[in-house]
Amino acid sequence: MVEEFRDLSRLSFNQMTAGKRGLREVVDACVCGGIPWIGPWRYAVGEAPAEAGRLIREAGLRASSLCRGGMFPAATAEERRKRIDDNLRAIDEAAAVGTDLLVLVNGPAPDRDIDGARRMVVDGIGEIASYAAECGVKLGVEPLHPMFAADRSVVVTLGQATDIASQFDSRWVGVVVDVYHVWWDPKVYAEIARAGERIFAFHVSDWIVPTPDMLMGRGMMGDGVIEIRRLRAATEAAGYSGPIEVEIFNEALWARPVDEIVGLVANSYLKVV
């Protein structure tokens, strides 16, 4: 059945929604499925980002973001320096791919000092922000759900992410609003409004009940409890009008053929988002 109205113009397919499949396979599926944007991951483009960018452009697609930079906290100054250098490479990769956004997932504390780790995040962004601006690449601080505080990110609310971003130029450092990570927060709508022009990306998936897996348990939009349309409306009221990126970590979904995944994403986007 063909939908009467199919506006996919803002839909972006995050590459990880298809698991670890290669970029070309995902690009081809997006083209066939009518999805105009793609969000590649560094594992797929790092060795040849310019070639990856050419592949995306020649297919008629645009890159909404590159994932991921960040992971700033570390136990030693030497390790922190290595992570800064890796982020500088990620900025180069983003520019070569042709996106103006590098998503920052900011890493766990190397010890029990979570406040100190958050200061390392601020310091790390301070080390790379001017270079990012020179390259025309924005930095999007993505807060993760608090269940990831111990192993993936010490930034766990949109308010924290905005507080961090607010210490830098609003043209180049902002936030990523991922509904999976922020839907639970009683302050989320006030924080979306506060973030305003600093909202650089909007990511969607759904929260399944019961959650089948801590990391790999995201659901297709409409299969869970998140008020996705309300969150989208809030970001748009705050001024965001960019791509809407579908990012789903789910091994059962990954087991499907990639063209089937793309079709499910497009249909769920139209019905729910």
Image: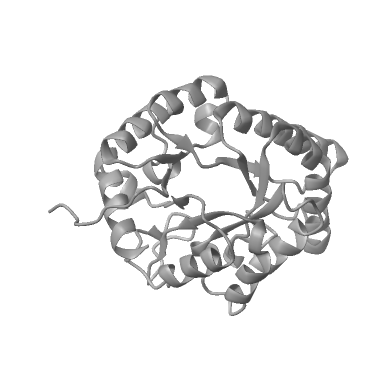
Q: Is residue 18 left or right of residue 168?
A: left
Q: Quadrant of the C terminus?
A: bottom left
Q: Position of residue 262 (x, y in %)?
A: 30, 44
- Image height check: is 140 above or below 179? above
Q: Residue at 78% across / 42% down in the picture?
A: 129
The residue nearer to you, when weighing 212 against 122, is 122
Most distant residue in the right direction: 77
Work out whether residue 157 can be spotted.
no
Q: Is residue 112 left or right of residue 32?
A: right
Work out whether residue 109 can be spotted.
yes
Q: Position of residue 159 (x, y in %)?
A: 69, 68
Q: Quadrant of the N terminus?
A: bottom left
The residue nearer to you, when weighing 186 against 8, is 8
- Image height check: is 131 above or below 9? above
Q: Residue at 52% across / 70% down in the picture?
A: 234
The residue nearer to you, when weighing 224 against 62, is 62
Q: Position of residue 115 (x, y in %)?
A: 81, 63
Most distant residue in the left direction: 1
Q: Residue at 63% across / 70% down in the picture?
A: 193
Identify the colour scheme used.
Answer: one colour
Q: For the image shown, how many numbered marks are present on the structure?
A: 0
Rendering quarter of residue 155: bottom right
Most distant residue in the bottom direction: 186
Q: Position of residue 253 (x, y in %)?
A: 32, 50
